[in-house]
Image (cartoon, rainbow, N blue to C red):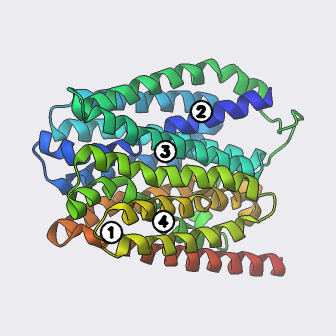
């Protein structure tokens, strides 16, 4: 029975990943079709992220009141409806309105399920959970790439993803009784009392080490945001590729991330969360160099994006899974809620600011940003470890 519930959680994270890469993959054509600036996708990202931040901060209280199953099902419906609305939008302001339910739905799923897995399941399940997100994010650019060659262009891509989302929503609603039946039980089906002490965001920030961890997570999400939002545009701008090929190449980032997270699930048996975070951050820094140098062919850059995704693989799930151990299981829900808010805050202004900067200069700056941020992630997570260890030794 618990295995079935784990499968439902995995499906929910595929649903969470599906919409996340659509905008970046389709934007080179969308902004022309809607007669808006190439940097305008940043405004959409801001709206989505601000709504996601609000949803993440409220998630602990909402989940406690309505249950993880109901919150997940309703959230998937919100994102599915938003994607369907995108497909019928004829102006940029309509996309801005629809970004609101999309953001609220994404934040609720992210916080509720990350906390559930961090508390009840092992690190390998956390890695495979985020592998499912990567799988969803990987599928979307492929769908969009195919759609851009058809009559409906980018609208067909959004419509296809919305139909998939509605199908997944039906599964989530059917699974609500299963969530209720398994409430308070662990992976072995035995009753498990997990303490729950809700904290305000200010209370969370007073816990030793959370500030550094949140800043590191902030920087990490910015790394993800660069390929998600601008990989397609990077290939179009720097290598003059067609939009459909560029959209397909953007999926290499997600291929690398998906493969890495699938592998990380096995590596967690031998390596700790901390070791995998270190390795991931350094791998991203090394891989970014393949994109930094401008070659005659686009292939090294394509490989570079795939390897950046591979390096990113363990970072998010391992930081999240280590939250109860670092800050206490009783505070896990509150800490992860704020953690998700910081993560999305990291992606709020990044697309817009980088889009404005690249539009005024060059999109070749993108890999330099990835390199700098990967070094920041390494430094900040190591600082978190030192603070947590010192606090533990003094307790």
Give the spatial CA distance, label 2 vs label 3. 16 Å
Q: Tell me where residue 373 appears, x and y as whole percent.
A: 45, 73
Q: Earlier in the sequence, mark 3 or mark 4?
A: 3
Q: Residues within 10 Å of mark 1 (few under 14, many from 20)?
A: many
Q: Earlier in the sequence, mark 2 or mark 3?
A: 2
Q: Residues within 10 Å of mark 4 (few under 14, many from 20)?
A: many
Q: Earlier in the sequence, mark 4 or mark 2?
A: 2
Give the spatial CA distance, label 1 vs label 4. 17 Å
Residue 25 vs 270, above or below: the answer is: above
Q: Where residue 253 is drawn, which disc sits there?
A: none
Give the spatial CA distance, label 1 vs label 3. 26 Å
Give the spatial CA distance, label 3 vs label 4. 15 Å
**Which structural element holds mark 1?**
helix
Q: Which residue is mark 4?
A: 218
| Residue depicted at x 49% and y 44% | 107
**Which structural element holds mark 4?**
helix
Give the spatial CA distance, label 4 vs label 2. 26 Å
Q: Quadrant of the C terminus?
A: bottom right
Residue 133 vs 335, above or below: the answer is: above
Q: Which residue is mark 1?
A: 366
Q: Which residue is mark 2?
A: 11
């Amino acid at each position: 029975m618990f295995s079935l519930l784990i499968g439902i959680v995995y499906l929910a994270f595929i649903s969470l990943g599906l919409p996340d890469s659509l905008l970046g993959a389709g934007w080179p054509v969308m902004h022309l079709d809607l007669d808006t600036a190439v940097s305008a996708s940043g405004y959409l990202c801001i709206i989505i992220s601000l709504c996601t931040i609000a949803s993440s901060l409220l998630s602990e209280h909402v989940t406690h009141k309505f249950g993880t199953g109901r919150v997940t099902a309703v959230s998937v419906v919100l994102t599915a409806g938003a994607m369907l609305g995108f497909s019928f939008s004829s102006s940029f302001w309509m996309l801005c309105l629809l970004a609101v339910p999309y953001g609220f739905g994404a934040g609720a799923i992210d916080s509720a399920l990350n906390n559930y897995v961090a508390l009840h399941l092992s690190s390998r399940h956390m890695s495979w959970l985020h592998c499912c997100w990567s799988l969803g994010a990987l599928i979307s650019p492929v769908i969009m790439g195919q759609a851009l060659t058809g009559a409906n262009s980018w609208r067909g891509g959004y419509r296809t993803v919305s139909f998939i989302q509605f199908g997944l929503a039906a599964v989530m609603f059917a699974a609500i009784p299963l969530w209720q039946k398994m409430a308070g039980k662990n992976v072995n089906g035995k009753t498990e009392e997990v303490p729950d002490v809700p904290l305000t965001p200010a209370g969370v920030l007073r816990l030793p080490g959370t500030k550094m961890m949140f800043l590191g997570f902030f920087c990490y999400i910015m790394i993800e945001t660069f390929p998600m939002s601008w990989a397609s545009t990077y290939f179009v701008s720097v290598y003059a590729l067609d939009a459909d090929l560029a959209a397909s190449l953007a999926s290499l980032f997600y291929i690398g991330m998906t493969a890495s997270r699938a592998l990380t699930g096995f590596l967690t048996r031998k390596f700790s969360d901390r070791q995998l975070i270190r390795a991931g951050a350094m791998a991203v820094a090394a891989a970014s160099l393949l994109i930094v140098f401008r070659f005659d062919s686009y292939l090294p850059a394509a490989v570079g994006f795939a390897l950046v995704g591979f390096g990113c693989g363990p970072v998010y799930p391992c930081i999240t899974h280590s939250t109860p151990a670092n800050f206490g299981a009783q505070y896990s829900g509150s800490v992860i809620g704020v953690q998700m808010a910081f993560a999305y805050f990291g992606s709020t202004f990044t697309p817009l600011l980088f889009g404005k900067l690249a539009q005024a200069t060059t999109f070749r700056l993108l890999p330099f940003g990835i390199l700098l941020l990967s070094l920041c992630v390494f430094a900040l997570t190591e600082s978190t470890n030192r603070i947590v260890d010192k606090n533990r030794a003094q307790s």
